[in-house]
Image (cartoon, rainbow, N blue to C red):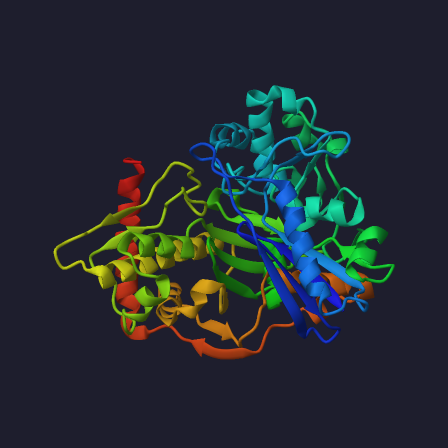
């Protein structure tokens, strides 16, 4: 058996998988986010351990005596700061924390960051968070002995080892992404050294062994290995089988991701596309990131007092975009705007705008944000020929039809099953334990394919043009 643990922002999920990749059991534990100031987003690392204890305890009810490997997935970019005795110095600063936007801009202005990391330095990345700490919390800065990413703090608890892997490390702005190694130059630019970084492995490699005390506690045998694992999107790529060039998925979760696998390194930071190492050796991936996907729909559902399923269920078949335009920038935007300060808006409101028109506008706004991501990926030479749809938003047929039509790309929906980060992590655990490779990360069985609607193509092109015009106008106002 193999365990996959996926540390999300709102909860930790674990699955138990057999050698045939059949999910035997799963468990979840909730997590909360603290926002002590505007733009801040923090989490207590101790809560991750508590959640892992709860999840492993639930999985242990199935019996874990046949477990051979554990894989890890987790939200990226978080700054988990430890002193010389591995004590946590402060709450983890999370991926969606924007306090370090000024530090990010200053680092991004230094040409070596884009040249070596292959990416814009975004406020959510780890390096500017440490630069913020140096300026605003100097007493803590002086005590920083190790900087770990969130899932790697779970690894420390599991194995006693300070280790990360390439896909998550690529989101720090300290990795030489082409060479798949820490950059001493970029670390020095933020006053840090390699000694303060975890050791690096590939996601499918062994990072350490499960501590004996934990194996005994949860009924696992000796010799259980813990794989390098992956950042949440890379692990999801492994889970859904997007590990080879030409394969891609669209994730409709709290945030949205347009993810494409590549067998070469082809960065283009100016597009605001993320170019990161994949969780498998000699493989990279590119992502366009939309900060509010289902988050935008959930925000609207609270505004109008109806749940998201009701809203999407009452709008009927796909229609041409109307006059009402929604910009989904509730907390800034990544691709292609790279702005922590831009905010969302409705434009084109009129007497005829009812609840259903508002719902369609929200779904269309996020869809057009994905189209911006597609255009940014295309600028690097990455062409999307088909997409797998994953995440909670993929339950909306309207949304999937809008995405297929707006992006002019067929969208495939997998059969019922979990192909997310926890499943990908379990696959990486299997690889680490057995020496298997990308061949076991197969694509899922497809339930159905949604094709673009040629009759609405021109209308969605025109809707996207209105969206871009509104985007340009709102930037000067927010």
- Does 178 sit left or right of 77 as displayed? right
Task: Give the quarter of the image for residue 317.
Answer: bottom left
In which quadrant is the N terminus drawn?
bottom right
Image location (x, y in percent) of residue 77:
59, 42
In which quadrant is the C terminus drawn?
top left
Name the residue rendered at 63%, 41% in the picture. 45
Task: Give the quarter of the image for residue 183.
Answer: top right
Total marks drawn?
Answer: 0
Image location (x, y in percent) of residue 71:
71, 58
Q: Nearer the viewer, residue 462 or 155?
A: 155
Image location (x, y in percent) of residue 380:
51, 52
Image location (x, y in percent) of residue 312:
33, 67
Q: Nearer the viewer, residue 17 or 349?
A: 17
Q: Considering only vertical position in the picture, is 43 above or below 19?
A: above
Furthest residue in direction left, as rendered: 351
Name the residue rendered at 62%, 32% in the picture. 90
Task: Give the quarter of the image for residue 475.
Answer: top left
């Amino acid at each position: 058996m193999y365990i996959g643990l996926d540390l999300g922002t709102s909860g930790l999920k674990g699955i138990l998988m057999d050698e045939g990749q059949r999910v035997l059991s799963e468990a979840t534990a909730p997590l909360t986010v603290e926002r002590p100031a505007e733009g801040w987003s923090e989490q207590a690392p101790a809560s991750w351990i508590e959640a892992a204890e709860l999840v492993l305890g639930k999985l242990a009810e199935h019996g874990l005596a046949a477990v051979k490997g554990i894989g890890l997935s987790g939200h990226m970019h978080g700054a988990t700061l430890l002193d010389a005795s591995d004590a946590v110095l402060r709450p983890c600063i999370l991926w969606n924390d924007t306090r370090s936007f000024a530090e990010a801009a200053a680092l991004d202005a230094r040409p070596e960051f884009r040249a070596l990391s292959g990416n814009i330095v975004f406020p959510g990345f780890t390096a500017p968070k440490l630069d913020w700490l140096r300026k605003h919390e100097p007493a803590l800065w002086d005590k920083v002995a190790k900087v770990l990413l969130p899932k790697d703090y779970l690894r420390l608890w599991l194995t006693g080892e300070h280790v990360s892997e390439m896909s998550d490390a690529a989101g720090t702005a300290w990795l030489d992404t082409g060479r798949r190694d820490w950059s001493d130059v970029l670390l020095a630019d933020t006053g840090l050294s390699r000694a303060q970084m975890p050791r690096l492995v590939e996601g499918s490699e062994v990072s350490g062994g499960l501590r004996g005390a934990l194996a005994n506690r949860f009924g696992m045998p000796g010799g259980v290995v813990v794989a390098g694992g992956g950042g949440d999107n890379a692990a999801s790529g492994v889970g859904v089988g997007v590990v080879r060039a030409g394969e891609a998925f669209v994730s409709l979760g709290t945030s949205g991701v347009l993810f494409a696998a590549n067998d070469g390194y082809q960065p283009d930071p100016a597009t605001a596309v993320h170019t990161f190492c994949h969780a498998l050796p000699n493989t990279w991936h590119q992502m366009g990131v939309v900060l509010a996907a289902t988050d935008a729909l959930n925000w609207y559902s609270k505004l109008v007092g109806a749940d998201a399923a009701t809203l999407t269920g009452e709008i009927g078949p796909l229609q041409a975009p109307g006059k009402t335009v929604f910009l989904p920038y509730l907390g800034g935007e990544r691709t292609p705007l790279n702005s922590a300060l831009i905010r969302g808006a409705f434009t084109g409101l009129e007497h005829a705008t009812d609840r259903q028109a508002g719902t369609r506008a929200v779904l269309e706004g996020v869809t057009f944000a994905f189209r911006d991501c597609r255009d940014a990926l295309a600028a690097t030479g990455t062409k999307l020929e088909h997409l797998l749809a994953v995440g909670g938003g993929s339950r909306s047929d309207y949304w999937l039809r809008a995405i297929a039509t707006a992006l002019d790309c067929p969208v495939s929906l997998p059969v019922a099953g979990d192909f997310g980060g926890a499943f990908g992590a379990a696959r990486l655990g299997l690889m680490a334990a057995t020496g298997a490779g990308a061949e076991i990360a197969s694509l899922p069985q497809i339930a159905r394919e949604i094709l673009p609607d040629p009759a609405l193509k021109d209308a969605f092109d025109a809707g996207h043009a209105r969206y871009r015009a509104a985007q340009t106008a709102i930037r000067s106002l927010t």
